[in-house]
Amino acid sequence: MAEATVLIPAYNEEASVAEVVRAARKAGFPAVVADDGSTDATAQRAAEAGAQVVRLAENRGKGGAYAAGLKLVETPFVILLDADLVGLTPEHIHALLAPVKNGEAEMSVGVFRGGRLLTDLGNRLTPFLSGQRALPTRLLREVPGLESARYDVELLLTRTAKERGWRVRYLPLVGLSQVMKEEKRGFLAGFAHRLRMYLEVLRYAASGRTRRGR
């Protein structure tokens, strides 16, 4: 039995999801793709590349996709990867898993280095928003509010780690990058999507500050 499962939430990522799945399979891990209500061929491309696919009837957000995909995970560890990665290798995946598997951390977080200037910069400014992570499966299942989280799911994981005293390791993922939203959707639509994502993250962060202030 494999040590870990690669869990990939995906929404309309037919152009890139197969590359991520193939890297996971080359690394020796089963891959689960949670197709979050896609209207393109994401599910088909993922299955053809060797993933087990769970399809959501409607878009539920990244946290909802994680929750759906977790139902298929049977390994002690889970590796979370975005579906739009460029340049992913088995070495990247093993590097993410190593500190968690070796008992050095409860969660690892990957940060882009030496990939593309804009994605590198974004990851360096906000590493706590990275979607590339590894942690024990039981800990992910215990994250409160996971199923209802959307763009703020990475902030939820980061906050849960802090509240519960998890050791977190931030790791450089050299040569890895992402397809930017402006490239996938066109500049205006992609920029608007990015703004909505940041606003949701800010609302979540503000709600946490309010709770701590009580």
Image (spheres, rainbow, N blue to C red):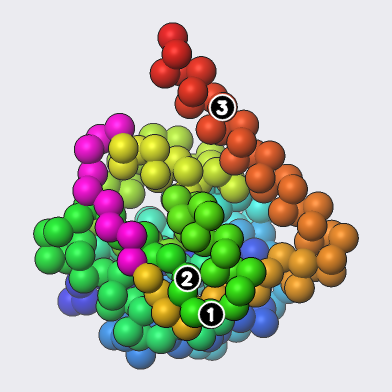
The amino acid pointed to by label 3 is: Ala
Q: Who's the residue at 28% across and 78% down the image? A: 94
Within 10 Å of disc 1 (Cα), the crowding (few <14, some 14-19, many 20+) is: some
Q: Is residue 15 in view from this perspective? A: yes
Residue corresponding to mark 3: 206
The amino acid pointed to by label 1 is: Gly
The magenta region covers 163-171
Decide whether residue 167 is among the magenta residues.
yes
Q: Who's the residue at 46% across and 74% down the image? A: 113
Residue corresponding to mark 1: 115
Q: Is residue 54 in view from this perspective? A: no
Q: Which label is found at residue 112?
A: 2
Instruction: Provide residue 101's location: percent of width, then percent of height.
Output: 17, 66
Q: Earlier in the sequence, mark 1 or mark 3?
A: 1
Instruction: Provide residue 70's location: percent of width, then percent of height.
Output: 38, 56
| Distance from the alpha carbon under mark 3 to that under mark 2 | 26 Å
Q: Are marks 1 and 3 in contact (CB under 8 Å)?
A: no
Decide whether residue 21 is among the magenta residues.
no
Q: Quadrant of residue 96?
A: bottom left
Q: Nearer the viewer, residue 159 or 121?
A: 121
| Distance from the alpha carbon under mark 1 to that under mark 3 | 31 Å
The amino acid pointed to by label 2 is: Phe
Q: Are marks 1 and 2 in contact (CB under 8 Å)?
A: yes
